Image: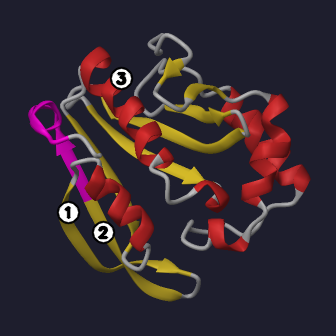
């Protein structure tokens, strides 16, 4: 079992495993149409759907095998303001996929960047990842900009590569290598 030493602390956040006590905070953003707008197959969640989601995330506190998801809550004095995750995609290639979702009320202050930076630092510096990538809908500018701030480069635009809400959609793929992570200019 591989996991960070919890909590991971940043200047303004604590990153820790999700617990059932986070239900109210998670439901506050999972129920919003503007939050799930770019999530494949997602609709605003009911409280019971959020409860199931929180219970699932609560079991994602470590990597036990390739394919596992490490999910952490980004916590401020206001409570859980977002979720950041790394999915262990390949043990052989030392690759993971980054994912994130944050409550819009806490946007514009760099908190999502701070949280994702901390989880990537664990992945590269502690776990020894070689490459991390992230994907988003081509019109999801906020996610694309966040990945850019993390030092990830856009590697691909997969044209009409998947069905999204009944239409063909383009997917953007961003990535960063360990040596790029070490030499990047941290976001200000």
Q: Is residue 43 above or below residue 3?
A: below
Q: Is residue 78 above or below residue 161?
A: above
Q: Which residues are magenta?
A: 174-185
Q: Nearer the viewer, residue 85 or 147?
A: 147
Residue identified by numbered label 3: 122
Which residue is found at the position 35% from the left and 65% from the top?
A: 144
Q: Of tags 2 and 3, which is closer to the observer?
A: 3
Would you say the residues marked 3 and 1 are in contact, meaning their CB atoms lie under 8 Å apart?
A: no
Residue 127's image quarter? top left
* Residue 168 or residue 15, whichever sits in front: 15
76 is higher (above) or lower (below) than 30:
above
Q: Residue at x 29, y 47 (%)?
A: 150
At mark 2, the secondary structure is strand
Whether residue 182 is in magenta: the answer is yes
CA distance for labels 3 and 1: 22 Å
Q: Earlier in the sequence, mark 1 or mark 2?
A: 1
Q: Which residue is mark 2?
A: 172
The extreme bottom residue here reads 167
Identify the residue position indicated by label 1 in the image: 154
Comes first in the chain, label 3 or label 1? 3
**Label 2 vs 3, first from the N-terminus:** 3
């Amino acid at each position: 079992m591989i996991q960070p030493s919890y909590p991971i602390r940043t200047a303004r956040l604590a990153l820790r495993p999700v617990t059932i006590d986070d239900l109210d905070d998670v439901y506050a953003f999972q129920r919003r149409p503007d939050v799930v707008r770019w999530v494949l197959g997602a609709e605003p969640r009911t409280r019971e759907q959020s409860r199931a989601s929180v219970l699932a995330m609560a079991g994602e506190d470590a990597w036990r095998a390739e394919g596992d998801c490490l999910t952490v809550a980004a916590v401020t004095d206001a409570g859980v303001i977002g979720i950041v995750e790394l999915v262990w995609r390949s043990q052989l290639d030392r690759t993971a996929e980054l994912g994130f979702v944050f409550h819009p009320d806490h946007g514009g202050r760099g908190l999502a960047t701070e949280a994702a930076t901390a989880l990537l630092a664990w992945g590269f510096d502690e776990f020894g990842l070689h490459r991390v990538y992230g994907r988003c809908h081509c019109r999801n500018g906020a996610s694309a900009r966040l990945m850019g701030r993390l030092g990830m480069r856009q590697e691909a635009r997969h044209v009409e590569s998947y069905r999204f809400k009944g239409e063909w959609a383009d997917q953007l793929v961003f990535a960063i290598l360990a040596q790029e992570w070490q030499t990047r200019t941290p976001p200000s």
